[in-house]
Image (spheres, rainbow, N blue to C red):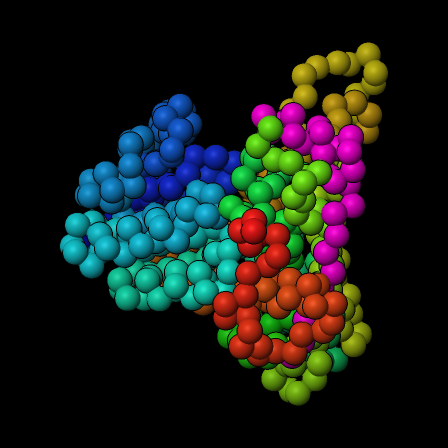
Amino acid sequence: MRDSGAALRIGFLGAGFMAQFHLRSLLGVRNAVAAGVVSATPARREAFAAAADLSGLGPCTAFASLEAMLSSGAIDAVWIASPNHTRLDAMREIHAARREGRTSVFAIACEKPLARTLAEAREMLRLAEDAGLLHGYLENQLFSTAVQRGRDIIWRRAVPNSGRPYLARATEEHSGPHEPWFWDGQRQGGGVLSDMMCHSVEVARFLLTAPGEPRDRLKLVSANGTVSTLKWRRPHYADLLRRRTGGEIDYARRPAEDFARGLITLEDPDGNRAVIEATTSWAYVGPGLRITLELLGPEYAMEFNSLATGLKVFLSREVTGSAGEDLVEKQNAEQGLMPVLEDEPGIYGYTLENRHFVERFRARQSPDETFADGVAVVEMLMALYRSAELERTVMLPDPELETYVPPVARPES
C-alpha cells in the first residue's frame, strides 16, 4: 500500500465535458495528480493527457482501455465521468480487477447521476462495497462556495434561534446538452429530469439537513412530478437537433422531456414537514446556465443566482467573434451585457468537491457524499418520473421503484 501522505493518483474514465471541469478544478487542489485517462475517442484522451501535463497536473497517461489503466499500477482512484449507459459495466470491471488483485485502485468516485435506474444504482453501491472500495458520489453543487457559506450561516446563526428550514427551492436551466447521448432517453436514462434534477434534489436535501447530520434523517414522504417537452419537439427545433447531432437524435419521433418540475415532501427529525421544490429545463435561453437556490425557514431566507455575477462585460454590435463558452457555461450570445463567471470550477463547486474527495481518499476515509447518497438521489428521481407517468402523487417508500424504468428510457417496442 502506498504511503497515505503521497499524492492521490487519479485516473479519469471519460475525457469529455465533465472530465474537463474536474481537470480544471484540480489546479486548486493539493496532493492530486491526473495520472491517467481512458476514453473511447483516441483524440480526446490524448488531448486530455496533454492538457493535464501542460497544466502541471501530470504526468498523465492516455490509456487505450480501462483494463490497461486499472492494471498499470499507476492509479489510486478512478473518477467515473463517462456516459451514463457505460457506468455500470465500468463498475463491474473495476470490481473484478479489485477482487482479483489486478489493480492498485482503492477508491472510486462517480459523476451524477449514479445510475439510470434504482436497480442500477443499488448495484453500483453493492459492487463498490463488495470490492472494499472507498466510494464517493460527485455532486458538485453541494460544494459550491455559495452553498457552503450560506448553509453554514443559516444553520449556525438562524436555526438555533427560530427552528429548522422547511422549504428548499432549486432550479437549473440551460439551452440543452453538449453531447448527443445526453438527449437520448435510453442511453442517458431520461431527459432533463434525470440529467439535471439530480443536482437540484440533492443540493436541496443538503441545505435542509444540519451539518454533521446524516441526510437520511430526512425521511421521504411523497413525490409529485411533471414532465413535458416544450421546445425541442417543435418541428423547427426537432430538425435543428437532428442536424446538430448528425441525424442521431430525432425528437419528432422519440422526444425526451426538456422541462421537469418536482415536489418532494420529507419529514425532519422533529416530525415537521419539509419540502423540496425543483424545476429544471433544457428550454431556457438566457446568457447561459442559470442555477437558482433558495432556503426558507421560520425567520430567515437564503438565495443564490449563478447569473447575478459581480463581473459583467458589455460588447457592442461592432464586436464580433466566434461562438464559444468563454464567459459562462452554455453561453447563448457573444454581444450585449453579459455576466461572466470568473471561476466556474469554484463557483459550481468542483474545486472544493475535489479537494474534499482527494483528502478523504488520501486519509483512507469515506467522503461526505457516497454512493449511498447517489442511490437516494436516484430513488427521488424515479419517484418523480413514476408520479409524472401515473399523474398522481407517489407515496414513499414505494416498492415499485425497485424495478421502475421511466417511459422515455424504455426500449422501443
Task: Inspect the magenta stretch and tell me whether residue 228 lies in it.
Answer: yes
Q: Is residue 58 visible?
A: yes
Give the image quarter of residue 10. Answer: top left
Left or right, 402 with respect to 1, comes to right
Q: Residue 227: x, y in percent? A: 72, 56
For this view, does 43 lie left or right of residue 92?
right
Image point (40%, 29%), residue name = 41
Q: Quadrant of residue 72?
A: top left
- The answer to whether residue 149 is left or right of residue 21 is right
Q: Which residues are magenta?
A: 221-246
Q: Is residue 49 above or below residue 210?
A: above
Residue 264 visible (yes or no): no
Residue 235 in magenta stretch: yes
Is residue 189 left or right of 364 when viewed as pictured? right
Relative image position of residue 171 (x, y in whole percent): 72, 54
Asked if 216 appears above or below 197 in the picture, the reply is below
Image quadrant holding the N terminus, namely bottom left
Vertical order, 132 against 139 (above or below): below
User: Which residue is at the far front?
Assistant: 413
Percent across and percent down for residue 362 are: 31, 55
Q: Nearer the viewer, residue 92 or 302?
A: 92
x and y percentages locating residue 310 in the rendered image: 74, 39
